[in-house]
Structure formats: C-alpha cells, structure tokens
Image (spheres, grey):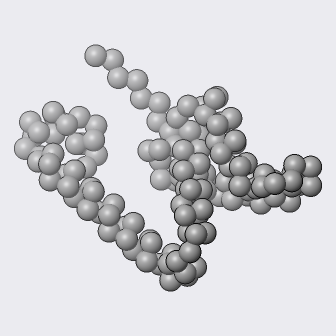
Amino acid sequence: MQATADDEMAALSLGISARFVYAAAWSIAFMAAGVGGTLLGNINGINISVSHLGLLVLPAVVLGGLNSVPGAIVGGLIIGVLQNLSGAYLDHYFPGGVKEIAPFVFMVIILLFKPYGLWGWERIERV
C-alpha cells in the first residue's frame, strides 16, 4: 500500500495491481469504520451526540498530521484537554459554547504556523 501511495507508476511497473491496492485500502477503512461505529453505538447509544463526536475527529487528525497515526493520537489528546480547559476557564468570560468552538479555532491557529500539522510530513516533490 505504501509503495502504491508513494509512486503509483513505479508500483505498476513492479507488477502491483493499483486497483486491488486501492480496493483493499477502502475495504479495510470501511470495515474499521463499521466496527468503530458499532462499538460507539453500543457504548453511547445512537443519538445526535455521536455526530458531535465525529466532528471532533477532524481537528484531532488535522492537528496531529494527516499522514501520522501517532500524531493523530496525540492530536486527539490535545484536543480533549483543550476542550475541557476552555470549558472550565473561558465559559465564564464568553458564555455560549466556547467548549465546542475551541478545537476548531486552535486547529486554524496551528495550521497557520505548521500547515502539515504537528507531526505531518512536509514532502516537496520536484518534477
């Protein structure tokens, strides 16, 4: 999968079927999302708060770096701590849901200085 993602033409020249690799990647992602959704539905039940939790995944993954799994884990921890601290300290001064907005504001501020996230790969490809 990594070879096909890095250079599809080189992988094709080595005999790797790119269509099969892409289909396998999508099927693995679909199965993981299904298992995760099933477990989350069993824990919390199916209600509107599940979509709010799903929206918090975006700043966590973007903050950590889109191509770094450990970065996404650390980004999730940072977003969780940030959300709770902003709810505890900033809700007194700015009533009306700073806790829900703070992860997205923090994500935008970090992306201004580090566009690839905290642990993202800055890969410049010259042609």
- Relative to 40, is 114 above or below? above
**Residue located at (54% from left, 50% from top):** 58
Q: Position of residue 46 (x, y in %)?
A: 52, 77
Left or right: 124 as drawn, with respect to 27: right
Compared with 82, 63 (above or below) is above
Residue at the extreme top: 127
Can you name the residue that lies furthest to the right here?
92
Residue 127 vs residue 91, the one in the foreground: 91
Residue at image x 19%, y 37%?
8
Residue 2 appears left or right of 39 = left
Q: Quadrant of the C terminus?
A: top left
> Residue 97, located in which quarter of the rendered image?
bottom right
Q: Quadrant of residue 100?
A: bottom right
69 relative to 41, above or below: above
In the image, taking residue 110 as reference, residue 20 lies left or right, namely left
Q: Residue at x 92, y 55 (%)?
A: 92
Q: Position of residue 42 (x, y in %)?
A: 50, 83
Residue 22 appears anywhere in the view: yes
| Residue nearest the observer in this picture, 43 or 117 | 43
Residue 90 image point, x, y percent: 87, 51
- In-front residue for pair 95/65: 95
Number of residue marks: 0
Position of residue 123 relative to residue 37, above or below, is: above
The residue lying at 64 percent from left, 42 percent from top is 107
Q: Is 84 positioned to the left or the right of 58 in the image?
A: right
Residue 78 visible in the picture: no
Q: Nearer the viewer, residue 54 or 65?
A: 54
